[in-house]
Amino acid sequence: MSNDDAAGRAKQKRGSRNRTGGGSAKARRKAARLAAVQALYQIDLNQIEPTGIAVESVIGEFVNHRLGEEIDGAKFVSADPQLFADIVRGAAHRRAEVDGMLASALEPRYALDRLELLMRAILRAGAYELFVHNDTHPRILISEYVDVAHAFFAAREPGMVNGVLDHVARALRPDELAQPDPSRDSSSDR
């Protein structure tokens, strides 16, 4: 069997799914954040322990089969795989710390364990990034996760994401929040 035959069989096996790649660095980061929320949701939904090989299995599944794919005619920007894996791995492995930050930011009537799984995944990913990604301004991170919330929710949930992550950012990075909003700078690509 020639290499062309093998490549053709592999393409047939995948069906209508093709890697699309492309996109700006900013678009790849946005796609990574969205995919990380989906992976964290999957981990929570399947009650996967937040440490160990199971989390790596979910990361591998996304990297190998979902990021940058064309599925049923819909083309997706290829996500930044390093950022994606960092968010999923970090939010899962440091879940206790992240959940502690979120619990202090939530009103008592909105206990973290009572939130819808997708909302919890968005908040965990955003809080984790605010905690460790000091190279990105907190306002940009908050805006990114509000956008993720808009991808899934149409009601008050995006506002809740904004409020909770703003509270976390004020606790973790108050000096940066006092600086001008870099997202208003059109040259910013972070």
Image: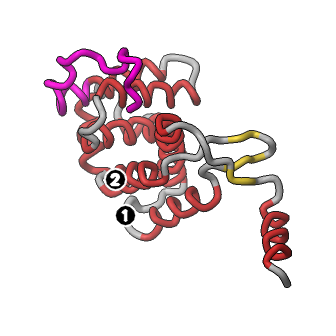
**Residue that numbered label 2 is attached to:** 90
Mark 1 Cα shell of 10 Å, populated few (<14), some (14-19), many (≥20): some
Q: Using the image, determine if residue 9 lies above or below residue 79.
A: below
Count the marks: how many?
2
Which image quarter: residue 152? top right
Measuring from the top left, give residue 166's x and y in whole percent.
29, 23
Q: Range of the magenta residues?
A: 167-190
Q: Considering only order in the chain, which callout, 2 or 1, is on the residue closer to the N terminus?
A: 1
Q: Residue at x 68, y 48 (%)?
A: 20
Residue 173 in magenta? yes
Give, as a three-letter code, the residue at label 2. Answer: Gly
Residue 118 visible from this viewpoint? no
- The CA span between labels 1 and 2 is 10 Å
Residue 181 in magenta? yes
**Residue that numbered label 1 is attached to:** 51
Residue 93 visible from this viewpoint? yes
Name the secondary structure under disc 1.
loop
